[in-house]
Amino acid sequence: MPIRAAFVLAALALATAQPAAAATQRFTVLANGEKVGHLVAEHEGRAASVDYAVSNNGRGPKAKEQIRFDAAGMPVSWTIEGSSLFGSPVSERFAWTDGQAEWTSQADQGRRPAAKPILYIGNDVSPWMLGVYVKALLKAPGRTLPVLPSGEMRLTEVRKITLPGGQGKEPVSLTVYELSGIDLSPDYVLVDSRGELFGTGGGRLIREGYEAHAPRLEALQREISIQRAEDAAKALAHRFDGPVRIRNVRIYDPESMTVGAPSEVLVFRDRIAGVAPMGASTPMRPGETLIDGQGGVLMPGLHDMHAHSSFSSNLFNLAAGVTAVRDQGNDNDALLEMMEGLRTGRLIGPRIVRNGFLEGRSPFSARNGRIADSLPQALDHVRWYADHGYWQIKIYNSFNPDWVAPVAAEAKRLGMGVSGHVPAFSSPDRVIRDGYDDIAHINQLMLGWILDPKEDTRTPLRLTGMARGKDLDLSSERVQATVRLMKERGTALDTTAMILERLMLSRSGEVQAGDAPYLDHAPIGYQRYRKRNFVTINSPRDDADYQAGFRKVLEVVKMLDDAGVQLLPGTDDGTGFSSHREMELYVEAGIPAAKALRIGTLDAERYFRRDGDLGTIQRGKLADFILIGGDPTADIRDIRKVRMTMVGGVAFYPAEIYEHLSVKPFAPPPPVSKAP
């Protein structure tokens, strides 16, 4: 039956259904303790309607859903209309009728015979549907169900808690459930004793009237996540009692940008104890661990210079060979707690350099880090970050341009650097003169050449406006004056080119070039998420403009490298795969692969001023490196073949990490043995 006819029949069935008392559920969407959206669900009989809207950081999804259920509570008709995170249109449909399930979404469309309804996992649904999934799974054998378009979802009970009442509210008994199996990370859902949705993990969505309990739910979520991360650390970290000998590897030297002859590397505890040609090293001793590199390339670990660390991103980065990240803004308490766990070895992840997120107050504010209402408050926030050991301040979109110079001066007086977006109604040249050490995102630099100074970059225009880049003349004085200023002041650029590609070239139903090498290894939910629009394409001209605009992004990458401006490869993403793509895009821009790898390894450590300890594989340095099953200097795509990551002498095998994360591995671990 055609899907349009199925919706007609569904509508007729709904119209003739026995009426029942309507129940209204109201929820608040929170970010960093502030209200940023709402969700209202009207549930009457076998029908429900949902109104969901979020506005945070100048963007947010908006959706209106209509759902019809069968007698068992399984959705059999479902429509979603609205817009996604960056405003692209959403029109999603699902229907089950007469043994046939059909669906269409931004990512895909399909049809499958089904004798009874199968749980459909929406591509652009509101969080209310998490409660629907829980209800369905609680009735399922083993709390596991096959789902559409494919795969299966699992439900696990995690915790029971009771929230006290107050202000006219009754105490609420809640169960915390983990939903897993369809995405890279699980969802956590809070359900009350009647089986109704109360909120989501961390209190980001919470039943109206209970907002005061959000901090407690945040703490609970953090506790659950930490326990999960500690369990992963116990299972995935390989620590060694004695020396570790890594044999038959070719070492990539970032200084010469060459790969050498077969060698051996000896590691003791967290340091490199020796590097020698094969056959010329000290003899193997009893108790040593031998790792056979099988002719692969051993190179310093990659860097993500624009990260937002989480427990899941820590694992994905280790699997991708990322041994160091610069955290460009986070929940400060959570990040400090994570750092302590990494220090003690209870948690695993790359080395983290912390930057303090500093935003100004406006209707478009990002609810992250610290938000300043005045210059004195901004200066006080800078001092807090300095007192807590942060490396830089990161300034954001709504920050008052007139505050940048005094804030930068105070940060530098206290020994910190300054990074960030170009605040709205300012310019790259101004923030460089005011004290920026680097600009975050290549679009933040280019918008200064593309947009009218009066245009507001606190909105999605900071992304959609990049389509105008197609007409940018890189030889113009406006462009070259900024490049000269960057070179003169030593200002670097945190590129995040891959996130611009992901946004500008996203097309419904298509897999991007940067995602194609790994996407079929990922769970179905993430596969669908990557096959969706983030920009609105209304015509072939729109498509061509975004394509040409992104080509200009790559031209700017090459121009800046040729001019001697330091590039900092970052992603603004948490999957690890994106760091590989950033390196590939440097090469597509025209930078030789061997140099791109130097930018992503030694040059990043020089920027951190840690190159005395890290960035090359030499005796006495910290044992942070990765084993590649190939030679990325000859073919940058080989950077995806990571077989082992070592951080401070602790080994991690990506194959094991990916299996833990429900991702099919890409390369086997190297053979490991112990000398008698």
Image (cartoon, rainbow, N blue to C red):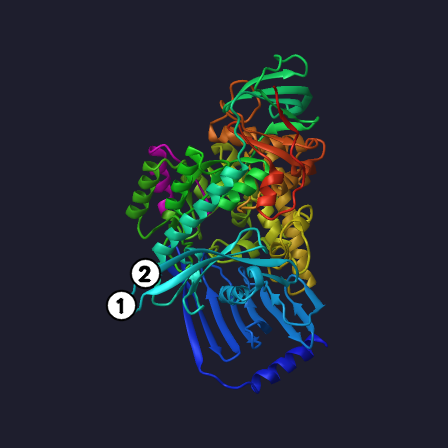
Q: Are marks 2 and 1 in contact (CB under 8 Å)?
A: yes
Report if residue 73 is visible in the image.
Answer: yes
Q: Where is residue 139 in the image (x, y as percent from the top left)?
A: 54, 67
Position of residue 547 relative to residue 622, above or below, is below
Residue found at the very far left of the displayed protein? 167
How much space separates mark 2 and mark 1, taking CA atoms? 10 Å
Dot 2: within a 10 Å radius of its alpha carbon, few (fewer than 14), some, or many (20 or more) residues?
few
User: 95 and 537: which one is in front?
Assistant: 95
Q: What stretch is highlighted in magenta?
A: 403-423
Report if residue 308 is visible in the image.
Answer: no
Q: Quadrant of residue 317?
A: top right
114 relative position to 413: left or right: right
User: 590 and 127: which one is in front?
Assistant: 127
> Helix or strand or loop: what does disc 1 sit on?
loop
Q: Where is residue 122 in the image (x, y as percent from the top left)?
A: 59, 64
Q: Where is residue 530 in the image (x, y as percent from the top left)?
A: 62, 55
Q: In which quarter of the image is residue 525?
A: bottom right
Membership of 411 in magenta stretch: yes
- Marker disc for residue 167: 1
- Which residue is painted at 65% across and 74% down in the image? 96
**How many circles with numbers are drawn on the protein?**
2
Instruction: Please name the residue that numbered disc 2 is placed on.
Output: 212
Q: Where is residue 95 in the image (x, y as percent from the top left)?
A: 64, 73
- Marker disc for residue 385: none
Position of residue 273 relative to residue 325, above or below, is above
Position of residue 648 relative to residue 109, above or below, is above
Question: The C terminus appears in which quarter of the rendering?
Answer: top right
Question: The N terminus appears in which quarter of the rendering?
Answer: bottom right
Membership of 44 in magenta stretch: no
